[in-house]
Each structure stands twice: as C-alpha cells, then as structure tokens.
Image (tube, rainbow, N blue to C red):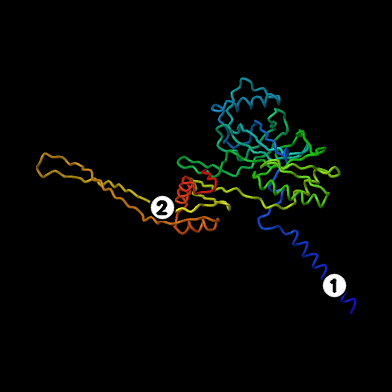
Amino acid sequence: MRLAVRLACRTALTIALAAAAMAVAAPAAGSSRIKDITTVQGVRDNQLIGYGLVVGLSGSGDSLQNAPFTEQALKSMLDRMGVAVRGVPLRARNVAAVTVTANLPPFVGVGSKIDVTVSSIGDASSLRGGTLVVTPLMGGDGEVYAVAQGAIQVSGFNVAGEAAEITQGVPTAGRIPNGALVERRVPGSLQGLQTLSLELNNPDYRTAALIADAINDYSANRWGRRIAAEQDLRTVLLNKPHDLGAARFLAEIGQLLVRPDQAARVVVDQRTGTVVIGQNVRVSTVALSHGNLTLRVTEIPTVVQPAPFSDGVTAVEPRTIVTAEEEDGTLAIIEGTDLQTLVTGLNRIGLQPTDIIAILESIKTAGALQAELIVQ
C-alpha cells in the first residue's frame, strides 16, 4: 500500500511538472520570439553581380548583329581558350549575354555554395536549356567573392508560330540552385565584441522597450544583472557576459517571447482594391454618406431618306440620349472604438473595396482617422 501511494505521488508530481513546463513554454497570444522580430546589427547579406554568357540555347539566343556586346564577350572568351576568331564575323544564335546576381550570406566560408539568378540583357527569347559558363561575381568593392556556373532552371516558356504566340512566365530569367562557389569570405566576426546591437524589423519605441525589459528580466535571473537598454525606436543595445560566446548568447536571447506593439496604419492598394487595417486604428465619431452618380450618354444616329423623285440625298442626323442615375446614399454614424467596430460599421453600409478606399481617404482628410494612411 505504501509503495502504491509513493508511486501515485511520484506520478502526480511528474504530471504537475510537465504541465508547468508546457505552460511556461506555451507562447502567449500574439507573442513572437526576439529572433523573429530583430536582426543583429552588422550581420547582413552582401549583394554580388557579374556579367556572363549562356551557351547551348536552341536558336533562342541573342542575334549578334543587334547585341554587339554578346559578340565581343564571345570572342574574348574564345581568345582566352586559344581559338582565334578576331576579324571573323559570328552569326550564332545559341549564345546569350546575361547578368548574374546573388546574395552572399553573412559568415559564409570559402567553398560554400549559394544560389544565383540569371537574367538576359540582350534580345534572346528564352534561356531554357542553356548553361552558364564560368562567371566571376563581384561585390560593391570590385573584389571577386564567388564564381558561378551551371545549367539554368527556367520556369517560363515561349512558343511561337506564324500567326500565334504563347508565352507563360518569364523565359528570359532563371535560377541556378547552388550555382556559385564562394571564393572569398567577407571580413567580419562576432568574436571579441562585448557590445551587440539588435535592430527591430518594424521600428517602434514601445516594442524596443518591451524587448529590453524581457532581456533584463531573463538576464537578472540568468547572470544576476541587467544587460539591455533601448537606444531609440530601432536599436536595443546589449552588453554580453564575459564568459559567454556571442553565438550562444544570441541563441538564448533570441528565444525570449515579446508581444510587439503595432503602429496605427491603414494600407490601401488602389490597383487591386486591397484594404488592410491595423489593430490599433481608431476613428473619431463621424457621420458619412456615400452614393454614386452615373451619367450615361447614348448615341443613336437616325438615317433620313429624301422624298421620292426629289433631288435630296440620304443624310444621317445625330441623336443623343443623356440619362443620369444616382444611387441612394445612406447616412451612417461610425465610431471606431476598436477594429471590429470599425469593420462592422463599414460593412453595415454595404461598400465595395473601392468605396471603402474613397471613404477612408475622406475620413483622413476630415481629421477623424487616427492612424497613418498609406496609399500604394
């Protein structure tokens, strides 16, 4: 009996500890990890670019007469390979001049592989089936950091006949997965840095303060002191403990949960009719009415025949009918104390997305929209 009671107590204690661990690990609604809403200052990609040639195209390459730079590059490449083509006109259509772009990740080592994007700059109709020859990729300082080569993957296609043409996607651009080898490492390291800076992806003063508070609460229990301080709406400064590496320190800090604050914004896209309203958007009490006036002009020309046995001629007399239709406008009072109330008020009037955009712009002009209105 005593053994059974002991086992039951141990089982209950295990279940209680597991439930407590799950409650601590479960993120609160709307919370995000610090690593997902910030980046470490100085840890970023570097853009690379190069000029190269794509060969092996099935008659869809550049016409060398219209793209002389392609012919010059092709002759230079053949000269370096020991083929004398100076003064010989070339008329190949299976070569295309391209620009090759890539992003060099931070701390990437020599010999690593990165993806590249290949885009035609001549009059080639398609890069499908082509192979990029060795192309050096340079950074903004003019140094070569990678070399690209390989078969191009093109998702689009272009099929043309004498009277019809079908094009899907963009056949003049493609990608080469792992198509470039890193030849030079970008200088920079986190080793030896005592002070680190976190930059917010969406700058906000309150979010920066919340991040600093969350890190200080953790560091007070972990290292016995506060290590974070918000500098401005974008930057949070961190003082790394001396006995901890930068990578492990950022790994621990990045797992902390913070509920970011949102700026009050309304984003509208007039081309697609998309309206995005933030959670903190508020509208002061306003009364609005929205109606449409439609003017329709119809031209119905009338043919007038002359009288029999007369010297008259057939004439066309213009006849214009103008009608005006105006939809009933409903006067409604909207008070957006929260997002749900605002959306409900707009839906109650029965508006289309284009109408909502026009109303939001008018409310902003009237000074009743307590948010930033961004029109794209």
Vertical side of 143 occupied by 87: above or below: above
Which residue is located at x 75 percent, y 36 percent?
A: 182
Q: Secondary structure at mark 1?
A: helix
Quarter-wise, where is residue 105 in the image?
Answer: top right
Q: Nearer the viewer, residue 273 or 348?
A: 348
Q: Residue 290's mark?
A: 2
Give the residue furthest to the bottom. Answer: 1
Which residue is located at x 51 percent, y 46 percent?
A: 269
Quarter-wise, where is residue 136 in the image?
Answer: top right
Crowding near pointer 1: few (<14 within 10 Å), some, many (20+)? few
Give the amino acid at mark 2: His
Give the amino acid at mark 1: Cys
Vertical side of 373 occupied by 124: above or below: above
Residue assigned mark 1 = 9
Crowding near pointer 2: few (<14 within 10 Å), some, many (20+)? some
Marks 2 and 1, the one that precedes in the sequence:
1
